Image (cartoon, coloured by chain):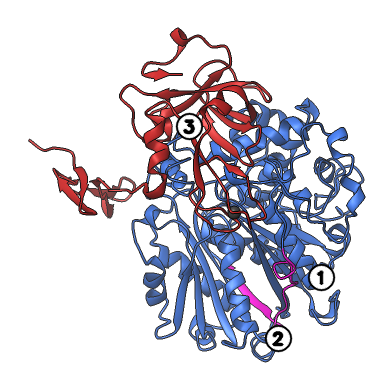
Chain colours: A blue, B red
Amino acid sequence: MIKFSKQQLKVPKLMRPVYLVTAGQSKFDRAIPDKRTEELCVDALTMAAEMLNLTPAELKQYIHTCYYGHFADHFGDQLLGEAVIHDRLGLDPLGNIGVKTGGATGGSTLWEAVKTVASGYSDCVLAMGWERMDEVPTDEGNFLISCAADKDWESPLGHIYTGYYAVMAQKYWQVFGKAEDSFRRTLAEISVKHHGYARFNPFAQGPMKITVDDVLKSPVVAYPLRALDACLMSVGAACAIICDEATAIKLTKNTKNKPLRIWVSAGSHTLRPADRRDMEIPLLPNETPDQYKNMEKEFPGSARYPGFTGFLGARMAAWYAYRMTGIVDPTKDLDVIELHDAFTISDVQTYEDIGLRPYGHGRDYVESGDCYHTNPKTGKPGKLPSNLSGGLIGCMHAVGATGIMQTFEIATHIWNRWAEMHGDEKLWKKFNRKKPADWTDLQVKGAKRALAISHAGVGSHVTATILMDPDHLLKKDA
Amino acid sequence: MSMFGQVYVKNNQYKIKGDFHHLTPCTPIRNADDGWKLMGVTNPREMTYMHSYGGEAIFFESLSQGKLMATKCENPKCESKGSIYQPFRIFCPDCLGKMAVMDMTKLAKEKATIHTFMVCERSGAFNILDKPIKFINIEFDGVCTILMSYLSKGDPEIGMRVVPIFQTLNPTYTILDLSWVPAGTKASALPQGFTF
Ligand SMILES: [Zn+2]
């Protein structure tokens, strides 16, 4: 049993309000052989500038520090790739640093950028993330990804990272999912939803009009997970500009972007799931100590927490973030979210870790229809739409960019610019993609508060990014 | 005739012999849709690394001798005193005291069950395990962590009793020297090179 000290559970506090003023991203695809990484980063930064009616040169004048999220040096065979991009963006002589925390790299890059502004060190920071996963074939790519597991204790076991995560999926599947066909179909529904939403996103690489049965017939990767349950492997870049209040007001004057308050929190848990020890469930503001008393009875085999079924890193990121920003019930207090759907089943695990549903009941978030833009059961707006970008399953997982792409997505809803940024014919043409005839506007009407979860592998690092319209805060001194 | 790089340690320095890399030429990548114009180049590379097991070396050496070693915190002031760790870890995660090395082979033979598992149809490059790979995570009575390994015989199930087997003939000196079979498996059924 491990316990956390009072000091470790301090609720984080930013020393001054921090704002997201703009963001941008490149096209995402499995391979982009006609572009160097810096070309993708320039695309992202140019879009961020254009959203503020500025040229990149004008926007660059404000930037004071740069954080670069790029996970896998060995994929691109370039150490200090961050410095290469920094030079090519013409941002010398500014201080810059690379960030890498596996799949959570994008979120961690924002975490650093926000703290840099909050501390007063900088008034305007660039957070740019990218990944280049197309310079080796898939088999070798799987080998390289497996190097992010413990090289003596895990990687030699098949050199397949999916397998190290999949054992956790199996435990969840049997204990909380009770290996039920109905639960398997719910998982498939998540894939249908995310590939489906990707059809309306010109940046997305995995648009598909599929059915639950298509998912259930796709090849088994690791039973019960199938090919269509898994995220994509991608190339692409995304960026965000983080500012203090004065700079935010200046940069957004006469633009469609309202400065949005931003907070990022982070949690972690053992890189080797093997090292997990038992503990009490750290409770979120919408949970009570007795609600988990009968968990073992309801779900035999669930007594060990977090065991192999929960992500403590995600739970702690939410624990800090909700207390920092005044969120009590995320389903009520938030309007739109993007989650790290590395697999359909990890999406469900995350619903519980971040308190959308109690542990064991994550599937209800899908089955109730709450997770949809439009609830298919009621025809009314979903209570808390998730992954309208298509997520990692439908849009992309260009690791270092993923957490920033999610933030771009949720911000466009609060800016009320979702349709503009996803429906523009010119964008579809530029990416050589065909806008579907049934393209649908997924703007969440009146969105004021949003959340993005960025997550590494088996849950070693997780960040929670929260955006709020400054006129709709939940806590005065947040 | 080239020879794969080999290494030993003398006076705490690496002594190396043979080739640690092989030179292979780059080749151009061209665009079939656009007059075979140049798009990039391949970068082949084969290289040998030297990696130290440090304080975990005894664990890997013991596998080749048919023993499963664990560690235990014996610091009387530690809040986790008495906790046993498998994976073997050198320092206690709580007090950072150096832990005592213990032989847990008997415990593993009597008290190991499958906590969870996964049968994996795919593998990455350089995999040498037979497919599908049967990943298993093993819990032991009295051990506070859950070891990851692989099952060499039968089909895994949560709660199944398993026993360790060791590659004592031609060991690889890696974690692959440790595998598991369902309790009751006969010695004659073990994979080549493995013993109880
Ligand atoms: Zn200790």
Secondary structure under badge 3?
loop
Residue A459 percent coordinates (x, y): 62, 51
Q: Is the residue B119 above or below the residue A56 in the image?
A: above
Marks 3 & 1, CB-CB < 8 Å contact:
no
Q: Which residue is mark 2?
A: A16
Q: Which residue is mark 3?
A: B68
Q: Tell me the chain of label 2.
A: A
Decide which of tag 2 and tag 1 comes sooner along the chain. Answer: 2
- Residue at x 66% of width, y 79% of height: A21
Q: Write down the region rendered in magenta.
A: A5-24
Q: Is residue B168 left or right of residue A430?
A: left
Q: Tell me the chain of label 1.
A: A
Q: Is residue A465 left or right of residue B125?
A: right
Q: Is residue A73 left or right of residue A154?
A: left
Q: Is mark 1 within 8 Å of ligand 1?
A: no
Distance of mark 2 from mark 3, alpha carbons? 54 Å
Residue A251 percent coordinates (x, y): 64, 87
Nearer the camera: disc 3 or disc 1: 3
Mark 2 nearby-residue class (10 Å; few <14, some 14–19, many ≥20): some
Marks 2 & 1, CB-CB < 8 Å contact:
no
Secondary structure under badge 1?
loop
Q: Nearer the viewer, residue A239 or B123?
A: B123
> Residue A476 colored magenta?
no
Q: Is the residue B65 above or below the residue A88 in the image?
A: above
- Residue at x 68% of width, y 25% of height: B158
- Label 1 sits on what residue type? Lys
- Residue at x 62% of width, y 45% of height: B83
Q: Is residue A292 among what the camera can see?
A: yes
- Ligand 1 shown in quarter: bottom right
Q: Which residue is mark 1?
A: A448
